[in-house]
Amino acid sequence: MKQEKKNIRHLNQEQINEYFENIGEKKFRATQVWEWLWQKHAHSFEAMTNLSKELRTNLSENFTLPALKVDATQYSADGTIKSRFKTFDGHLVEGVLIPTEERKTACVSSQIGCSLSCKFCATGYMDRKRNLEFDEIYDEVVLISQQSERVYEKKLSNIVFMGMGEPLLNYKNVLRAIDKISSPDGLGMSPRRVTVSTAGVAKMIRQLGDDKVKFKLALSLHAANDQKRHEIMPINDTNNIKSLIDALNYFYKQTGNEITFEYILFKDFNDSLKDADELIKIYRQVPADLVNIIEYNPIDAAKFQKPDEETVNTFMKHLDKSKVNARLRKSRGKDIDAACGQLANKE
Protein backbone atom coordinates (compact mmCIF):
# COMPACT_ATOMS: atom_id res chain seq x y z
CA MET A 1 0.00 0.00 0.00
CA LYS A 2 1.36 3.42 -0.99
CA GLN A 3 2.27 5.56 1.99
CA GLU A 4 0.47 8.89 2.23
CA LYS A 5 2.74 11.85 1.50
CA LYS A 6 3.53 14.13 4.43
CA ASN A 7 3.13 17.90 4.39
CA ILE A 8 6.78 19.02 4.34
CA ARG A 9 5.99 22.08 6.49
CA HIS A 10 4.85 19.77 9.29
CA LEU A 11 8.43 18.51 9.65
CA ASN A 12 10.86 20.31 11.93
CA GLN A 13 14.35 21.30 10.84
CA GLU A 14 15.99 18.17 12.30
CA GLN A 15 13.57 15.91 10.41
CA ILE A 16 14.32 17.70 7.13
CA ASN A 17 18.07 17.44 7.84
CA GLU A 18 17.62 13.72 8.50
CA TYR A 19 15.70 13.20 5.25
CA PHE A 20 18.46 14.86 3.19
CA GLU A 21 21.11 12.83 4.99
CA ASN A 22 19.19 9.62 4.17
CA ILE A 23 19.08 10.42 0.45
CA GLY A 24 22.78 11.31 0.42
CA GLU A 25 22.38 15.06 -0.03
CA LYS A 26 24.58 17.66 1.65
CA LYS A 27 23.27 19.38 4.81
CA PHE A 28 23.23 22.83 3.22
CA ARG A 29 20.50 21.60 0.83
CA ALA A 30 18.22 20.99 3.83
CA THR A 31 18.95 24.54 5.02
CA GLN A 32 18.06 25.88 1.56
CA VAL A 33 14.71 24.04 1.62
CA TRP A 34 13.98 25.32 5.14
CA GLU A 35 14.60 28.89 3.95
CA TRP A 36 12.36 28.38 0.93
CA LEU A 37 9.55 27.13 3.17
CA TRP A 38 9.64 29.77 5.91
CA GLN A 39 11.58 32.82 4.77
CA LYS A 40 11.16 32.94 1.00
CA HIS A 41 7.58 31.59 1.28
CA ALA A 42 7.76 29.16 -1.64
CA HIS A 43 4.34 27.68 -2.35
CA SER A 44 5.62 24.89 -4.60
CA PHE A 45 8.74 22.75 -4.93
CA GLU A 46 9.08 24.07 -8.48
CA ALA A 47 9.70 27.56 -7.05
CA MET A 48 12.84 26.37 -5.19
CA THR A 49 15.09 27.47 -8.05
CA ASN A 50 18.50 26.89 -6.45
CA LEU A 51 17.79 23.14 -6.12
CA SER A 52 18.47 20.76 -8.98
CA LYS A 53 15.51 19.56 -11.06
CA GLU A 54 16.10 16.00 -9.74
CA LEU A 55 15.93 17.17 -6.13
CA ARG A 56 12.75 19.14 -6.73
CA THR A 57 11.20 16.07 -8.37
CA ASN A 58 12.28 13.91 -5.42
CA LEU A 59 10.65 16.33 -2.97
CA SER A 60 7.38 16.49 -4.92
CA GLU A 61 7.26 12.68 -5.12
CA ASN A 62 7.75 12.30 -1.36
CA PHE A 63 6.05 15.33 0.19
CA THR A 64 3.14 17.69 -0.28
CA LEU A 65 3.28 21.48 0.05
CA PRO A 66 -0.36 22.55 0.47
CA ALA A 67 -0.51 26.33 0.55
CA LEU A 68 -3.22 28.97 0.72
CA LYS A 69 -3.94 30.84 -2.48
CA VAL A 70 -5.66 34.19 -2.90
CA ASP A 71 -9.02 33.39 -4.51
CA ALA A 72 -10.50 36.92 -4.65
CA THR A 73 -9.59 40.41 -3.45
CA GLN A 74 -11.80 43.41 -2.67
CA TYR A 75 -10.63 46.98 -2.12
CA SER A 76 -12.57 49.33 0.15
CA ALA A 77 -12.90 53.07 -0.43
CA ASP A 78 -11.10 53.56 2.93
CA GLY A 79 -8.03 51.54 1.88
CA THR A 80 -8.99 48.28 3.62
CA ILE A 81 -8.29 45.16 1.56
CA LYS A 82 -10.24 41.92 2.03
CA SER A 83 -8.87 38.67 0.65
CA ARG A 84 -10.66 35.41 0.22
CA PHE A 85 -8.19 32.54 0.46
CA LYS A 86 -8.68 29.04 -0.89
CA THR A 87 -7.26 26.04 0.96
CA PHE A 88 -5.73 23.00 -0.79
CA ASP A 89 -8.99 21.08 -0.14
CA GLY A 90 -11.23 23.77 -1.62
CA HIS A 91 -12.45 25.62 1.51
CA LEU A 92 -12.69 29.41 1.59
CA VAL A 93 -11.55 31.66 4.42
CA GLU A 94 -11.15 35.42 4.69
CA GLY A 95 -8.48 37.81 5.96
CA VAL A 96 -8.26 41.61 6.01
CA LEU A 97 -5.50 44.21 5.72
CA ILE A 98 -6.41 47.29 7.77
CA PRO A 99 -4.15 50.26 6.97
CA THR A 100 -3.75 53.45 9.01
CA GLU A 101 -0.98 56.07 8.90
CA GLU A 102 0.84 54.52 11.87
CA ARG A 103 0.21 50.83 11.35
CA LYS A 104 -0.66 48.11 8.89
CA THR A 105 -2.68 45.39 10.61
CA ALA A 106 -3.53 41.90 9.36
CA CYS A 107 -6.81 40.51 10.68
CA VAL A 108 -6.56 36.74 10.27
CA SER A 109 -8.88 33.75 10.65
CA SER A 110 -8.17 30.62 12.67
CA GLN A 111 -11.03 28.33 11.57
CA ILE A 112 -13.10 27.76 8.45
CA GLY A 113 -16.47 28.89 9.78
CA CYS A 114 -17.20 28.90 13.51
CA SER A 115 -19.04 26.74 16.04
CA LEU A 116 -19.94 29.48 18.55
CA SER A 117 -23.06 30.98 16.88
CA CYS A 118 -22.68 34.52 18.26
CA LYS A 119 -25.88 36.27 17.17
CA PHE A 120 -24.27 39.47 15.82
CA CYS A 121 -21.46 37.90 13.79
CA ALA A 122 -21.85 36.73 10.19
CA THR A 123 -19.31 33.90 10.65
CA GLY A 124 -21.42 32.66 13.59
CA TYR A 125 -24.19 31.77 11.14
CA MET A 126 -21.86 29.44 9.22
CA ASP A 127 -20.93 25.89 10.16
CA ARG A 128 -17.40 25.17 11.29
CA LYS A 129 -15.84 23.07 8.55
CA ARG A 130 -12.43 22.55 10.15
CA ASN A 131 -9.54 24.20 11.95
CA LEU A 132 -6.86 25.92 9.92
CA GLU A 133 -3.45 24.26 10.18
CA PHE A 134 -0.61 26.37 11.60
CA ASP A 135 1.05 26.66 8.18
CA GLU A 136 -2.22 27.89 6.64
CA ILE A 137 -2.49 30.62 9.29
CA TYR A 138 1.14 31.50 8.55
CA ASP A 139 0.27 31.73 4.83
CA GLU A 140 -2.57 34.17 5.61
CA VAL A 141 -0.13 36.48 7.38
CA VAL A 142 2.48 36.18 4.61
CA LEU A 143 -0.04 36.88 1.82
CA ILE A 144 -1.49 39.91 3.66
CA SER A 145 2.03 41.14 4.41
CA GLN A 146 2.97 40.88 0.72
CA GLN A 147 -0.19 42.86 -0.11
CA SER A 148 0.80 45.55 2.37
CA GLU A 149 4.24 45.89 0.81
CA ARG A 150 2.82 45.90 -2.70
CA VAL A 151 0.02 48.43 -2.11
CA TYR A 152 1.39 50.55 0.77
CA GLU A 153 5.14 49.86 0.54
CA LYS A 154 5.08 49.05 4.24
CA LYS A 155 5.56 45.81 6.12
CA LEU A 156 2.88 44.55 8.50
CA SER A 157 3.16 46.13 11.93
CA ASN A 158 0.44 44.17 13.78
CA ILE A 159 -1.56 40.96 13.62
CA VAL A 160 -4.96 40.40 15.21
CA PHE A 161 -6.71 37.05 15.42
CA MET A 162 -10.15 38.58 14.97
CA GLY A 163 -11.21 36.94 11.71
CA MET A 164 -13.30 33.81 11.25
CA GLY A 165 -13.39 31.24 14.05
CA GLU A 166 -12.50 31.05 17.74
CA PRO A 167 -8.68 30.95 18.10
CA LEU A 168 -8.71 29.21 21.49
CA LEU A 169 -10.67 26.29 20.01
CA ASN A 170 -7.77 25.81 17.60
CA TYR A 171 -5.24 26.29 20.37
CA LYS A 172 -2.22 24.28 19.17
CA ASN A 173 -2.27 25.56 15.60
CA VAL A 174 -2.71 29.20 16.66
CA LEU A 175 0.20 29.00 19.13
CA ARG A 176 2.38 27.19 16.62
CA ALA A 177 1.56 29.77 13.92
CA ILE A 178 2.43 32.66 16.27
CA ASP A 179 5.63 30.85 17.21
CA LYS A 180 6.57 30.68 13.53
CA ILE A 181 5.49 34.29 12.86
CA SER A 182 7.71 35.53 15.70
CA SER A 183 10.63 33.17 15.05
CA PRO A 184 13.85 34.59 13.49
CA ASP A 185 13.63 31.85 10.84
CA GLY A 186 10.03 32.83 10.11
CA LEU A 187 8.73 36.40 9.93
CA GLY A 188 10.67 37.62 12.98
CA MET A 189 7.75 39.74 14.27
CA SER A 190 7.57 40.52 17.97
CA PRO A 191 4.77 38.55 19.70
CA ARG A 192 3.91 41.85 21.44
CA ARG A 193 2.52 42.95 18.08
CA VAL A 194 0.10 40.02 18.02
CA THR A 195 -3.35 40.08 19.68
CA VAL A 196 -5.50 36.98 20.05
CA SER A 197 -9.19 37.75 20.50
CA THR A 198 -11.44 35.20 22.18
CA ALA A 199 -15.19 34.97 22.73
CA GLY A 200 -14.22 33.63 26.15
CA VAL A 201 -13.03 30.07 26.76
CA ALA A 202 -12.01 30.31 30.42
CA LYS A 203 -10.10 27.01 30.56
CA MET A 204 -7.98 27.94 27.52
CA ILE A 205 -7.33 31.49 28.81
CA ARG A 206 -5.81 29.84 31.88
CA GLN A 207 -3.83 27.52 29.60
CA LEU A 208 -2.38 30.60 27.86
CA GLY A 209 -1.19 31.73 31.29
CA ASP A 210 0.38 28.34 32.03
CA ASP A 211 2.09 28.40 28.63
CA LYS A 212 3.50 31.87 29.46
CA VAL A 213 2.60 33.24 26.04
CA LYS A 214 4.07 36.60 25.01
CA PHE A 215 1.20 37.97 22.88
CA LYS A 216 -1.69 40.21 23.92
CA LEU A 217 -5.18 38.97 24.71
CA ALA A 218 -8.55 40.53 23.89
CA LEU A 219 -11.86 39.35 25.33
CA SER A 220 -14.99 39.86 23.22
CA LEU A 221 -17.32 40.83 26.06
CA HIS A 222 -20.15 42.69 24.23
CA ALA A 223 -22.52 42.53 27.21
CA ALA A 224 -21.67 43.16 30.85
CA ASN A 225 -24.13 40.86 32.58
CA ASP A 226 -24.71 37.13 32.14
CA GLN A 227 -28.34 37.39 31.06
CA LYS A 228 -27.63 39.72 28.14
CA ARG A 229 -24.39 38.01 27.20
CA HIS A 230 -26.17 34.65 27.10
CA GLU A 231 -28.73 36.13 24.67
CA ILE A 232 -26.11 37.08 22.08
CA MET A 233 -23.25 34.68 22.89
CA PRO A 234 -24.29 31.09 23.70
CA ILE A 235 -20.71 30.36 24.91
CA ASN A 236 -21.63 32.34 28.05
CA ASP A 237 -23.68 29.30 29.23
CA THR A 238 -20.47 27.41 29.98
CA ASN A 239 -18.13 30.40 30.41
CA ASN A 240 -19.93 33.00 32.50
CA ILE A 241 -18.53 36.44 33.25
CA LYS A 242 -17.20 35.51 36.70
CA SER A 243 -15.26 32.53 35.32
CA LEU A 244 -13.80 34.80 32.61
CA ILE A 245 -12.76 37.48 35.14
CA ASP A 246 -11.00 34.79 37.22
CA ALA A 247 -9.30 33.35 34.10
CA LEU A 248 -8.14 36.80 32.91
CA ASN A 249 -6.66 37.60 36.32
CA TYR A 250 -4.85 34.25 36.29
CA PHE A 251 -3.57 34.94 32.76
CA TYR A 252 -2.26 38.36 33.81
CA LYS A 253 -0.62 36.99 36.96
CA GLN A 254 1.23 34.39 34.88
CA THR A 255 2.23 36.60 31.94
CA GLY A 256 1.84 40.32 32.74
CA ASN A 257 0.56 40.70 29.14
CA GLU A 258 -1.87 43.37 27.96
CA ILE A 259 -5.58 42.58 28.17
CA THR A 260 -8.24 44.43 26.17
CA PHE A 261 -12.03 44.23 26.40
CA GLU A 262 -14.01 44.44 23.16
CA TYR A 263 -17.53 45.78 23.44
CA ILE A 264 -19.84 46.26 20.43
CA LEU A 265 -22.63 48.78 21.03
CA PHE A 266 -26.10 47.56 19.99
CA LYS A 267 -29.02 49.98 19.90
CA ASP A 268 -31.41 49.60 22.90
CA PHE A 269 -29.61 46.44 24.04
CA ASN A 270 -26.31 47.27 25.76
CA ASP A 271 -25.92 51.02 25.20
CA SER A 272 -27.54 52.55 28.31
CA LEU A 273 -25.73 54.17 31.26
CA LYS A 274 -26.72 51.16 33.38
CA ASP A 275 -24.89 48.96 30.85
CA ALA A 276 -21.91 51.32 31.03
CA ASP A 277 -21.88 51.00 34.84
CA GLU A 278 -21.87 47.20 34.59
CA LEU A 279 -18.99 47.41 32.13
CA ILE A 280 -17.06 49.73 34.48
CA LYS A 281 -17.56 47.22 37.31
CA ILE A 282 -16.01 44.41 35.21
CA TYR A 283 -13.17 46.67 34.02
CA ARG A 284 -12.22 47.37 37.64
CA GLN A 285 -11.93 43.67 38.44
CA VAL A 286 -9.34 42.95 35.76
CA PRO A 287 -5.99 44.64 35.01
CA ALA A 288 -7.20 45.59 31.52
CA ASP A 289 -5.30 48.25 29.56
CA LEU A 290 -8.15 49.24 27.30
CA VAL A 291 -11.82 48.89 26.43
CA ASN A 292 -12.41 48.97 22.68
CA ILE A 293 -15.93 50.26 22.05
CA ILE A 294 -16.82 49.04 18.58
CA GLU A 295 -19.37 50.36 16.11
CA TYR A 296 -21.86 47.67 15.16
CA ASN A 297 -21.70 46.62 11.51
CA PRO A 298 -25.06 45.33 10.28
CA ILE A 299 -25.29 41.85 8.77
CA ASP A 300 -28.19 40.31 6.82
CA ALA A 301 -28.81 37.49 9.30
CA ALA A 302 -29.27 39.67 12.43
CA LYS A 303 -31.73 42.38 13.42
CA PHE A 304 -29.36 44.48 15.53
CA GLN A 305 -28.82 48.14 14.79
CA LYS A 306 -26.14 50.61 15.76
CA PRO A 307 -27.02 53.37 18.27
CA ASP A 308 -27.15 57.02 17.20
CA GLU A 309 -24.13 59.26 17.68
CA GLU A 310 -25.51 60.99 20.76
CA THR A 311 -26.01 57.67 22.59
CA VAL A 312 -22.48 56.58 21.69
CA ASN A 313 -20.98 59.88 22.88
CA THR A 314 -22.93 59.75 26.16
CA PHE A 315 -21.72 56.17 26.73
CA MET A 316 -18.09 57.13 25.99
CA LYS A 317 -18.22 60.22 28.24
CA HIS A 318 -19.62 58.12 31.10
CA LEU A 319 -16.69 55.68 30.79
CA ASP A 320 -14.23 58.55 30.61
CA LYS A 321 -15.67 60.20 33.72
CA SER A 322 -15.16 56.88 35.55
CA LYS A 323 -11.48 56.77 34.48
CA VAL A 324 -11.95 53.88 32.09
CA ASN A 325 -9.36 53.86 29.31
CA ALA A 326 -11.84 53.46 26.45
CA ARG A 327 -11.43 54.04 22.73
CA LEU A 328 -14.12 54.17 20.07
CA ARG A 329 -13.06 51.93 17.22
CA LYS A 330 -14.43 53.17 13.93
CA SER A 331 -15.27 50.46 11.45
CA ARG A 332 -13.13 49.96 8.38
CA GLY A 333 -14.04 48.18 5.14
CA LYS A 334 -17.82 48.21 5.67
CA ASP A 335 -18.47 48.69 1.94
CA ILE A 336 -16.83 45.32 1.18
CA ASP A 337 -18.16 43.40 4.23
CA ALA A 338 -14.68 43.43 5.76
CA ALA A 339 -15.56 45.15 9.03
CA CYS A 340 -15.76 43.54 12.47
CA GLY A 341 -18.36 40.73 12.46
CA GLN A 342 -18.97 40.77 8.70
CA LEU A 343 -16.70 38.02 7.40
CA ALA A 344 -18.84 35.29 5.89
CA ASN A 345 -17.47 34.26 2.49
CA LYS A 346 -20.16 36.28 0.74
CA GLU A 347 -19.88 36.38 -3.02
Image (cartoon, grey):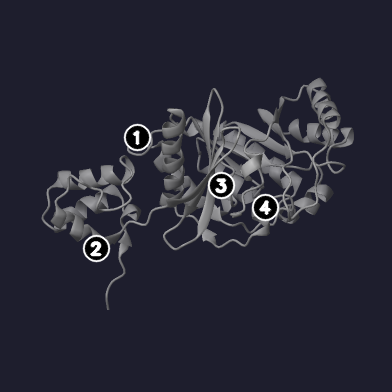
Q: Secondary structure at mark 2?
A: helix
Which badge, 3 or 2, comes first in the chain's sequence? 2
Rounded to the nearest whole Å, what is the CA distance between mark 3 and mark 4? 28 Å
Are circles 3 and 2 on residues that touch, CB within 8 Å?
no
Which badge, 2 or 4, comes first in the chain's sequence? 2
| Of labels 3 and 1, the one closer to you | 1
Quadrant assignment for the N terminus = bottom left
Which residue lies under the disc numbered 4? 122
Q: Position of residue 296 (x, y in %)?
A: 74, 41
Which badge, 3 or 1, comes first in the chain's sequence? 1
Q: Residue at x 74, y 55 (%)?
A: 301
- Can residue 256 be seen from the camera position used here? yes
Which residue lies under the disc numbered 2? 62
Which badge, 4 or 1, comes first in the chain's sequence? 4
The amino acid at mark 2 is Asn
| Of labels 2 and 4, the one closer to you | 4
Which badge, 3 or 4, comes first in the chain's sequence? 4
Rounded to the nearest whole Å, what is the CA distance between mark 2 and mark 4? 40 Å
Which residue lies under the disc numbered 3? 207
For residue 251, which quarter of the picture?
top right
Q: Which one is nearer the viewer's eye here, 204 or 314?
A: 314
Q: Secondary structure at mark 3?
A: helix
Q: Position of residue 17 (x, y in %)?
A: 21, 50
